[in-house]
């Protein structure tokens, strides 16, 4: 699918869009211009979402277990604590999410920010 931006309006060069979005589950809704064949891979199937969560949690638990078995030699004493890397990674991710939200408030513009001011200039003359 190819998208072009012409005068601020996205133009989609693809087959005609469907009237209603495809709903795979109560949590995943595909955009109107997306067909099922484009999102028919393993990650988008509703029956695999719990498997993704289970595998992700298993990997996290495995890293903590390996850290308990394998000795950690770090440059700083605080990094020798059990599960420090997991806690540090989670805290760093949380800080990034909060910073992104705060940055969104700073750089957010109103919907009509790029609208033409032809009506305002016509009123002035």
Image (cartoon, rainbow, N blue to C red):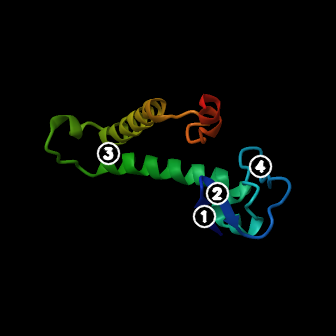
**Dot 4: within a 10 Å radius of its alpha carbon, few (fewer than 14), some, or many (20 or more) residues?**
few
Residue 86 relative to residue 115: left or right: left
Picture coordinates of residue 5 (x, y %)? Answer: 59, 60
Q: Are marks 4 and 2 in contact (CB under 8 Å)?
A: no
Quick check: 12 above or below 124? below
Disc number for residue 10? 2
Q: Residue at x 59, y 38 (%)?
A: 117
Pointer 2 and pointer 3: residues touching (CB < 8 Å)? no
Residue that numbered label 1 is attached to: 4
Q: What element carries label 4?
A: loop
Distance of label 4 from label 2 (alpha carbons):
28 Å
Q: Which of 8 and 13 is in front in this view?
A: 8
Q: Name the residue under label 4.
A: 25
For label 2, the SS is: strand
- The residue to which callout 3 is attached is 68
Circles 1 and 2: CB atoms closer than 8 Å: yes
Q: Where is residue 90 in the image (x, y as percent from the top left)?
A: 40, 38
Residue 64 % position (x, y) = 38, 45
Earlier-in-chain disc, 4 versus 3: 4
Which circle, 4 or 3, is nearer the viewer? Answer: 4
């Amino acid at each position: 699918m190819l998208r072009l931006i012409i005068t601020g309006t996205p133009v989609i060069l693809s087959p005609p869009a469907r009237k209603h979005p495809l709903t795979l589950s109560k949590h995943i809704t595909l955009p109107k211009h997306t067909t099922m064949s484009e999102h028919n891979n393993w990650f988008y199937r509703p029956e695999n979402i719990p498997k993704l969560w289970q595998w992700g949690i298993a990997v996290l638990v495995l890293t903590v277990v390996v850290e308990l078995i394998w000795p950690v030699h770090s440059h700083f004493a605080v990094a020798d604590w059990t599960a420090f890397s997991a806690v540090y990674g989670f805290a760093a991710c949380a800080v990034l999410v909060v910073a992104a939200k705060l940055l969104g408030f700073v750089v957010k513009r109103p919907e009509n920010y790029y609208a033409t001011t032809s009506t305002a200039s016509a009123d002035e003359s």
